[in-house]
Image (tube, rainbow, N blue to C red):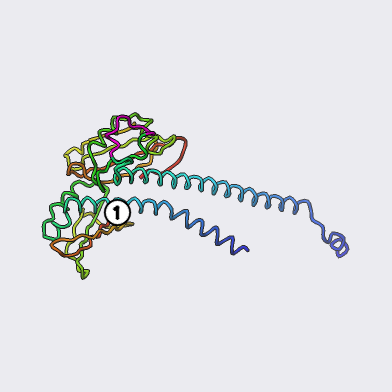
């Protein structure tokens, strides 16, 4: 009985401690999808695959100082064909959003990591 | 000696009773204190979760949906009777200036009702992130002082990257600010 009570108390504590972190991650995940939608709408991703990173640079300049991001674009075979981002050091919790797109008839996956500093 | 011990077998002295009583009292008071603190903490977490969900829902609807009906900004009267939900997006993460302009001219309480808020005060800003001074293009609602919950989302407006920042102010509640 004491063991069951101890487990319930322990799991409640773990749940309560982890809750705010999860909320922050959900916010970051929403932001990662926003940035991917913006990049997709303005063809930043297609441009990046073709070697033009000016769109990603626009995003980099526009982001608030505390918001960091990194975009990795992989081709159909999973090889990394582009990587870029805000340039700030990656640390702590981040959220990862994915978006698929085509460029020149080829299929790509963009992965957007977003974190706060 | 033997006779004395034998005579007091099974009896408790007053000092022992008093010590025992204080030990039990200490345990009960400690338990009550911990219990109260836990209940308060649970209430705070629950409030935070509710607020977080609410502000996320509002921000999500504004940047992802056109609202309902989709062309609500063309209506003669915009209030909670004619508009079921509010949205700024012409399409996913692409905002429409007409919707923002119409929202900015709306009555504060009407908009609060459409956003699904009850007693919360709100303040929404749309900031041009690509301008040198990060110009605020639209400010909707009232900016209150004090604690608030904030959700930031990113979108496009006329080809420019903008930040939609939704702030909710809650009365008499403790919550986090992000």
Residue located farthest toward the left when viewing the structure as drawn: A51
Q: Badge 1, how many Cα within 10 Å: few under 14, some, many 20+? A: many
Residue topped by disc 1: A115
Q: Which residue is drawn at 31% across and 37% down?
A: B124
Q: In which quarter of the image is residue B159?
A: top left
Image location (x, y in percent) of residue B53: 41, 47
Residue located farthest toward the bottom when viewing the structure as drawn: A77
Residue B146 as seen in the image, left or right of residue B130: right
Specify start and end residues of the magenta stretch as a single range: B71-81
Image location (x, y in percent) of residue B25: 67, 49
| Secondary structure mostly seen in the magenta stretch | loop
Image location (x, y in percent) of residue A19: 43, 53
Query: Relative to the observer, which residue lies in front, B16 or B138?
Result: B138
Query: Relative to the observer, which residue lies in front, A37 or B146?
Result: A37
Q: Residue at x 28, y 32 (%)?
A: B104
> Is residue B86 depicted above or below A51 in this figure?
above
């Amino acid at each position: 009985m004491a063991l069951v009570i101890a487990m319930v108390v322990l799991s409640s504590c773990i749940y309560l401690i982890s809750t705010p972190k999860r909320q922050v991650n959900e916010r970051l995940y929403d932001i990662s999808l926003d940035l991917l939608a913006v990049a997709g709408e303005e063809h930043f991703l297609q441009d990046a695959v073709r070697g033009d990173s000016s769109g990603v640079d626009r995003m980099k300049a526009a982001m608030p100082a505390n918001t960091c991001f990194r975009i990795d674009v992989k081709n159909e075979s999973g090889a990394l064909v582009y990587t870029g981002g805000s340039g700030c050091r990656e640390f702590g919790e981040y959220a990862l959003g994915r978006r698929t797109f085509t460029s020149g008839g080829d299929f790509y996956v963009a992965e957007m990591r977003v974190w706060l500093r | 000696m033997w006779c004395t011990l034998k005579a007091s077998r099974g009896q408790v002295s007053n000092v022992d009773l008093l010590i025992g009583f204080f030990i039990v009292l200490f345990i009960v008071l400690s338990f009550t204190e911990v219990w109260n603190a836990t209940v308060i903490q649970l209430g705070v977490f629950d409030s935070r979760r509710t607020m977080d969900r609410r502000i996320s829902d509002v921000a999500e609807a504004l940047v992802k949906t056109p609202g309902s009906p989709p062309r609500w900004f063309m209506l003669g009267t915009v209030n909670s009777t004619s508009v079921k939900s509010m949205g700024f997006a012409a399409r996913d993460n692409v905002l429409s200036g007409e919707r923002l302009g119409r929202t900015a001219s709306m009555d504060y309480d009407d908009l609060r009702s459409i956003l699904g808020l009850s007693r919360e005060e709100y303040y929404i800003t749309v900031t041009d992130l690509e301008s040198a001074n990060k110009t605020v293009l639209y400010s909707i609602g009232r900016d209150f002082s004090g604690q608030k919950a904030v959700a930031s989302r990113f979108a496009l407006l006329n080809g420019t990257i903008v930040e939609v920042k939704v702030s909710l102010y809650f009365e008499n509640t403790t919550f986090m600010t992000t």
